[in-house]
Amino acid sequence: MSNHQVLNNADHRDLRVLLEPSAERGDAVMGTLVTPIEFRRVQAEYPIVFRKNQEDDSFTALALFGFENGENLFLKDGNWDARYRPLSLAIQPFLIGRTQNGEGVGQVHIDMDHPRVSKNGEGTRVFDEDGGTTPFLEDIAGMLGELDQGHRDSAGFFDALKRHDLLEPFTLEVPLSDGSKHSLVGFHIVNESKLQSLDGDALADLHGSGHLMPVFMALASLSHFSDLVERKDAKVRNG
């Protein structure tokens, strides 16, 4: 359940948010949604994979943190062991709210039942003592704006991927030093061979619409699968 409220300095003057990463605060996830606008930052740390919605054949992109549900191999002793946290996690417990028709300027909402909302007076203030916005809230507003724009731009990006048939199903076998094996199934990745074989018109189409760079970033991110396997193996070795 969630309890979404429009953020304001009357009702939420003393609101504080717990920033430290932890499983209890919602960070124990295998992956999180990312948008093409942040692929350059995501690809520096995580593999980017694509998940297909079987109901309507649409796709979403995810930064991958582990190989099974609830596994985040970047979460260690209350720290996030990477330089970048994807926006969809970094903005929690905040979100963008809009009118029912989706038009107009978005409002900053907060889920008051989210585990990051402090119940004991600890954490980072959202508003200062005079009701003004804190630098923390200004940063959150900027991230929310970027994430909102990223979602709006995603439809064209995924349409381009389908138009040029650039995604392929992907299976990864993960052998570990203790003799066990894990399999990663159910995702798609950028098909490098098809990307290389695109003609000039197709490349011009992707470049002109701003989609070519995110495609290359998603492809480059796949080198991090070896890092992810190493993290998984270290976890198994250390119990």
Image: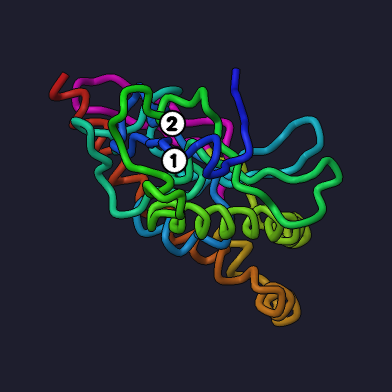
Q: What x and y, as percent, mark residue 50?
A: 59, 44
Is 49 located above or below residue 66 in the figure? below
The residue beneath circle 1 is 64
Q: Which residues are magenta?
A: 171-191
Front position in the image: 121 or 205: 121
Is 36 located above or below residue 229 in the figure? below
Q: Quadrant of residue 22?
A: top left
In magenta segment, residue 174: yes
The residue beneath circle 2 is 30
> In the rendered view, does 132 fall on the left or right side of 6?
left
Front position in the image: 164 or 14: 14
Q: Quadrant of residue 25?
A: top left
Amino acid type, mark 2: Met
Is 38 located above or below residue 17 in the figure? below
> In the rendered view, does 89 fall on the left or right side of 158?
left
Q: What x and y, as percent, mark residue 134?
A: 40, 54
